[in-house]
């Protein structure tokens, strides 16, 4: 983790005045802190919103319930006002994450999260990577649930044009066959595959090895990176 300056403003205006350059806002911290530990994010300043009272708590005037951006999920889940006004919201809040994270996650989300821009179809269609020294390999594996995917290794040009963080590893999905199991599972073009059935994928060869081990009717669990978020997707045989 790189060095940074730490601030604890007491008001929204004071926090806004500190937001400049490479500064990041810290709310729950579940995304930002992990990215900093891995040195994927190196902010110059951290602005902790936890001491701003105007952003915290849950208020009710009998007609309206106002949930502060810094209210914890556990607060929402156990709030008598929320349970009375919107019981489904309280029930949903109780189901988010685990017991430990429910006291950490904030209702307004993590403003310091590193989010890469989602590549549009236009961006993908116009993508003209610089000619690499060696041909960029793509792979389509037959006879399993990943046959409907085409992927390629991550090169500097692809990562730059698709706004993929420079230190990301894995393979990028370049096309998803319509009507196939991968599309049904929600895999999208531009997703970066980082694991196949818990086997780590850092390069194309890793993907080929993990994918070829799949049987024809075997489910594949993929760890994807999408828009700065990690998610697991289960690709089931059709």
Image: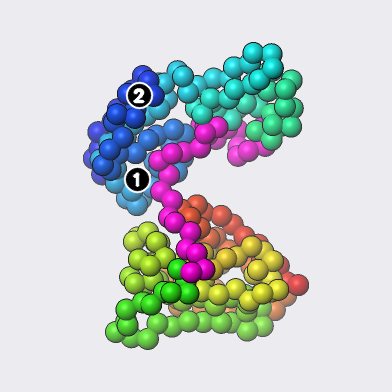
Task: Residue at 63% x, 76% y: name it.
Answer: 177
Along the line of sight, the residue nearer the viewer: 19 or 224: 19
8 over 138 or under it: above or below? above
Image position, residue 234 (x, y; %): 65, 62
- As for residue 234 lying within the magenta part, the answer is no
Image position, residue 56 (x, y; %): 50, 21
Is 92 positioned to the left or the right of 20 in the image? right
Is 61 positioned to the left or the right of 154 in the image? right
Is 75 positioned to the left or the right of 109 in the image? right
> Circle 1 is placed at which residue position?
36
Task: Residue at 66% x, 78% y: name it.
Answer: 144
> Quarter-wise, where is residue 92 in the image?
top right
Callout 1 crowding tier (Cα within 10 Å): few <14, some 14–19, many ≥20: some
5 over 206 or under it: above or below? above
Number of the front mark, 1 or 2: 2
Give the spatial CA distance, label 1 vs label 2: 26 Å
Is 114 positioned to the left or the right of 176 in the image? left
The prevailing secondary structure element of the residues shown in magenta is loop
Q: Quadrant of the C terminus?
A: bottom right
161 over 142 or under it: above or below? above
Task: Residue at 50% x, 64% y: name it.
Answer: 120
Query: Who comes first in sequence, dot 1 or dot 2?
Result: 2
Q: Residue furthest top?
A: 61
- As for residue 113 lying within the magenta part, the answer is yes
Q: Quadrant of the N terminus?
A: top left
Query: Which portion, as a residue range, is magenta?
Result: 94-122
Q: Is residue 201 visible?
A: no
Q: Is residue 43 visible?
A: yes
SS class, disc 2: helix
> Circle 2 is placed at which residue position?
13
């Amino acid at each position: 983790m790189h060095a940074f300056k730490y601030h604890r403003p007491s008001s929204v205006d004071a926090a806004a005045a500190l937001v400049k350059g490479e500064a990041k806002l810290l709310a729950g911290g579940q995304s930002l802190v992990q990215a900093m530990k891995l040195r994927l994010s190196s902010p110059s300043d951290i602005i902790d919103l936890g001491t701003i009272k105007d952003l915290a708590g849950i208020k009710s005037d009998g007609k309206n319930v106002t949930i502060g951006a810094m209210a914890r999920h556990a607060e929402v889940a156990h709030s008598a006002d929320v349970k009375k006004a919107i019981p489904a919201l309280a029930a949903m809040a109780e189901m988010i994450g685990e017991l430990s994270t429910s006291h950490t996650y904030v209702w307004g989300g993590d403003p310091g999260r590193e989010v890469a821009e989602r590549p549009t179809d236009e961006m993908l269609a116009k993508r003209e990577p610089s000619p690499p020294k060696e041909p960029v390999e793509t792979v389509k594996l037959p006879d399993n649930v990943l046959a409907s995917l085409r992927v390629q290794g991550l090169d500097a040009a692809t990562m730059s044009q698709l706004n993929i963080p420079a230190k990301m590893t894995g393979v990028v999905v370049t096309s998803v066959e319509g009507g196939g199991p991968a599309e049904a599972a929600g895999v999208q073009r531009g997703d970066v595959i980082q694991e196949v059935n818990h086997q780590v994928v850092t390069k194309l060869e890793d993907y080929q090895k993990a994918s070829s081990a799949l049987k024809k009717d075997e489910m594949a669990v993929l760890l994807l990176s999408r828009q700065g978020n990690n998610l697991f997707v289960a690709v089931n045989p059709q």
